[in-house]
Amino acid sequence: MAEESTATAPPELTVDVAGLTALLDGTYADVRRTVRELLPSYAGVLEDAETMSRDAFRERVKDVVLEIAGTGAAGMGFPKEYGGGGDIGASIAAFETLAYGDLSVLVKVGVQFGLFGGAILQLGTQRHHDAYLADVVSGRLLGCFAMTETGHGSNVQALGTVATYDAATAEFVVTTTSPEAGKDYIGNAAKHARVAVVFAQLEVGGEGHGVHALVVPLRDEDGALLPGVRIEDDGPKMGLNGVDNGRIWFDGVRVPREALLNRFADVTEDGTYVSEIESAGRRFFTMLGTLVQGRVSVGAAGVSASKAALTIAVRYGLQRRQFETGTEDGTEEGAEQLLLDYGLHQRRLFPRLARTYALHFAQEVLAGELHDVFSGVRDDEETRRLLESRAAGTKALATWHATDTVQECREACGGAGYLAVNRFAALKADTDVFTTFEGDNHVLLQLVGKGLLTDYASDFSDLDQLGMVRFVAGLAVDTVLERTRVHRLFEQIRDALPGGKDDWHADSGLRDPSYHLAMYRFREEHLIGGVARRLKRGVDAGMNPGEVFSRVQDHVIAAARAHVERLVLEAFVEKVASVPEDDGGLRLTLNLLCDLHALSGIEADRAWFIEHGRLTAQRSKAITREVGELCRRVRPLARELVDAFAVPEALLRAQALIGGEA
Amino acid sequence: MAEESTATAPPELTVDVAGLTALLDGTYADVRRTVRELLPSYAGVLEDAETMSRDAFRERVKDVVLEIAGTGAAGMGFPKEYGGGGDIGASIAAFETLAYGDLSVLVKVGVQFGLFGGAILQLGTQRHHDAYLADVVSGRLLGCFAMTETGHGSNVQALGTVATYDAATAEFVVTTTSPEAGKDYIGNAAKHARVAVVFAQLEVGGEGHGVHALVVPLRDEDGALLPGVRIEDDGPKMGLNGVDNGRIWFDGVRVPREALLNRFADVTEDGTYVSEIESAGRRFFTMLGTLVQGRVSVGAAGVSASKAALTIAVRYGLQRRQFETGTEDGTEEGAEQLLLDYGLHQRRLFPRLARTYALHFAQEVLAGELHDVFSGVRDDEETRRLLESRAAGTKALATWHATDTVQECREACGGAGYLAVNRFAALKADTDVFTTFEGDNHVLLQLVGKGLLTDYASDFSDLDQLGMVRFVAGLAVDTVLERTRVHRLFEQIRDALPGGKDDWHADSGLRDPSYHLAMYRFREEHLIGGVARRLKRGVDAGMNPGEVFSRVQDHVIAAARAHVERLVLEAFVEKVASVPEDDGGLRLTLNLLCDLHALSGIEADRAWFIEHGRLTAQRSKAITREVGELCRRVRPLARELVDAFAVPEALLRAQALIGGEA
């Protein structure tokens, strides 16, 4: 527990809301403005979600998605020749801003334009682009992305749908081989998709070539199912009930040879399998890698949902009074204190607010890298792998953050937070699955961990968990560490990090970003080294790799998480450093938030830092005190800091109730 | 991160499910069995919640509540002469078991029989009992409990509804004095209540006497609102949409003098206020104290919801396979490992499972005390205050646990967890407000903290936060500590607690319950002492009490939480000790769960223990290893440990999907 600080009051900060919004909006301020202006026109969907039947709401959401497609806001990432905007960065910015509105609309946009359209764009070739993209972008052709199966959520390489080449007719025959191999949770499948991109094990001439994607028609123009296709509704869900998720089974469905999305592999008419990528695993991961935009988008949506939740909760905390405050002479006795004046309330909201800023800037860096890679500005295999790792990790952190923040904000608004009109009901229910779709967060962090341990070497891209265990166990621990770029990156800072009991006064330098970074980097490197050591020791002791992995799994994930936390902090620190010192109070304000983010992150994991000799008990307590102090400094800026997110007022349904006018 | 243990394998445990269920069911096994047999008859409500319109669902839930009333399962706590069962402990056991089913039904039962009926029983006298109770118990008269106001959630003493006595007509005039003084979130108000128990500031002859409760009719026999009563629907909520919450405004509504629930205070016909309790604050808290059953019930429901969630998640983890496992010789290669075999998955579910057991037994102790106090077995003022404190604290911990456990279980079931058919959607949405209603959890823990600091002395029962700050600041710190029973209780163990670096081998005695208890007790005492010191220092430094409280608030809450955690652990340890050693594997099994609960609790707060010199870094790591080891020991028992909760199969809708038959 913190003790009272005796520090003198810091200079008062003021926040230029418009300036801060401009900084947050960045390169794509125009795109964001356009979408913000679009959102109020369908703000009513938020209420429709509560009042309409599920069927009616699905139609309503579809109509809104088509409206949005009509404005061009959904197709910004597609080539201009097909009616798109030709700018991937813009498409992420638009999606992120759309996430202030109803999330069924957002996810249906994601399914149609990101997953379905994205797969055709990335995995297909000219013939597919010409055949489909213009209709995808305009919304004339609605489709779905049929990857996940009931029996195989995260392990896509093992899925059970099969596409067998029939050379006699030059067709693929698509079949669901078992009930568990039915496609599941497929958005747009239950109602609206006429076409699916189907992921299936490709079999040519009796030989399996791993998972590939094909375009398979599902319904005719009137929406009737085509022969051999069976579809079942996934039924009501916790949230996102405007999206028609369903299950699909294929019974010998025939599609022409050209239906194969053949950018990375093809089958010739006579039944010869050809691919420039020799390793099946590497080919698979290369294909998946082109779909990375989905993860970047979901992470962005998680940050936006957090912004909306914090906006509502902070405003509520500034209007609601609770219990009485007072001075010794009794003059204020009887007046109740604002909720946000309570230390605990600040502690609940402000570190999450600071982290939302941090994740915003981390998303900005990520979206920039995505844009550069997919626009060809900088595209090589190593850059792609780093991008995929960053996308996976940032998605995990951003979506967990959303789950946590929406929950805390709901509770911080008490009973009012429970009423649907105050938005938390939908925010909670709709975002809840973000931690699962586009890759379960734990599985994604395992992926990040694997990348760290194998240094993203493409030779190891097709290693599964057991392969990774064997690989790492086969190296000397030092070799593992030396292989990692983490090691090369941190070598120079390792000695610079203060640590033991004597080096530091307990509270000196607590707000120094180089101290924060050194702590985050130390943790990352130490955890990676520890994982390598444990994997090795487990195998050396004769345990089977599955058992070793099971035992070390939480450590792998902790290492991955530490890695991504470091990336997030670096993004924030670099952003702050890029703001001119004389730019009003902007830099000081961001600095304050960055300190709060960094220190509350260290505080949350302070047991680890103490256990590993990087914090004394005394300094740990000093950090807790400092976090409390930083929260008090954020307090007078809180309203401006959420206003800068610029969530359109029309979407803050809460206002009426929060204002107490009900 | 844990290292691999080199311990030899412990003896294999087997669990007698029926025996464990009998142990959990305890004294009221018959009542629980009756309710378990009743639940399947309306299991369909779980699906109705998704498919029916809100209006239709409200009617459906009302009908089910009336059916339950017809079986006698809802009125067990009322005197037999009014058709009740005359057994408060039985009523808690019934309510706890009903919580396995639809939670709108449960909460509507709670509103009608617990809040509304309970207020008439506890705050009223013979005339009210005779007039209402038989109709309440049978469900012929539905009512509501109108305490909370839009502007005053947690600060009931400050509410704005006024009841003025008019001696000329011997009536009270009930008036909502401002828009913010409208009653809000009132269950049963929007549709079904014909009568309300209304909490209002009593004014007699121009003098205010604080908050009292009156019976105020709202609607006539046909459901039409009576003159002066305005009611508005609270609208859709995150969950519990089968309960008709609403807002109520009163405009000069007149009720006879006899409408005052006059057990603790009355107004004579000529307008004289009389009460045996002189202090207004003490009177208020005495009245509130009689309503403690509501908090006990909500905590119980939180534990039941956690049991249902864990049952589904553990079964899912035992059916779902993910990625491949294998042995070095390749024989098992290609088989996928069960989710529950992953160390991380165990880490996510088993400490929560152990804690659910702990909270179950803590609830059992609490319900026993409630029964004894309200049955007159042991009823004095000190016992009541301890009961109220324990109820408030246990409610907070149990409901937070439910929020956390349902969330983690949902995520552990991935996409399947998001489908409504698998129950998490409703479990999450319906239980979410448990942390808020019957008292916001943070406010409840503040109450507990106040009790600790003032040693529950009745003289201080009407102290508000500022009063408490001033009171504590006025004492020497030693005096505060000496005043507390914590001090008296722990004096003897303080020296027995091992602590510093030299006393312990890092992993000796980790499974010794006296070690666990000593740690929990040390934390509690240390935190209380620290709060007292900080309050004193803040006031001494000239800060106003409001500011002092704001800064120390998180510390007060931490102290209260530590106190309740200690009570929970003691309940578990005592239960284990009460099981005969030769009773099959039952005692060993409970012992394992108790160790896991205790150690994962220390692990979660290990930073604090290290900071305060009670854990070395080395021993802290040993605890983390031990928690992993205990999880591995729980693994083979997991199915039996959730089966022992005996959630009726008909309520586990999830089964179909989880079995992969979909």
Image: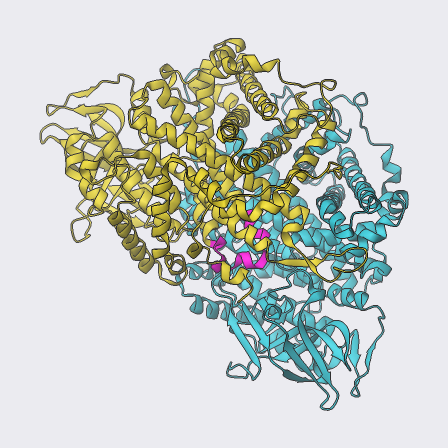
Chain colours: A yellow, B cyan
From what the image shows, is residue B234 above or below residue B18? below
* Relative image position of residue B261 (x, y in whole percent): 72, 77
Query: Quick check: B259 left or right of B527?
Result: left
* Relative image position of residue A364 (x, y in whole percent): 42, 33
Q: Nearer the viewer, residue A464 or B604?
A: B604
* Relative image position of residue B137 (x, y in whole percent): 63, 74
Where is the N terminus of chain A found, in terms of image quarters? top right
Q: Nearer the viewer, residue B198 or A421?
A: A421
**Residue lying furthest left:** A168
Q: Which residues are magenta?
A: A407-425
Query: Quick check: A107 left or right of A506?
Result: left
Asked where in the image residue B31 lies, by quadrant, the reply is bottom right
Residue A500 among those drawn in magenta: no
Asked whether the viewer can see residue B189, the reply is yes
Q: Nearer the viewer, residue B543 or B109?
A: B543
Residue A414 among those drawn in magenta: yes
Q: How many marks?
A: 0
From what the image shows, is residue A21 above or below residue B425? above
Q: Mainly helix, strand or loop, the magenta region?
A: helix
Query: Quick check: A95 left or right of B388?
Result: left
* Relative image position of residue B3 (x, y in whole percent): 61, 21
Asked whether the viewer can see residue A176, the reply is no
**Residue lying furthest bottom:** B168
Asked where in the image residue B514 lies, by quadrant, the reply is top right
From what the image shows, is residue B273 above or below residue A463? below
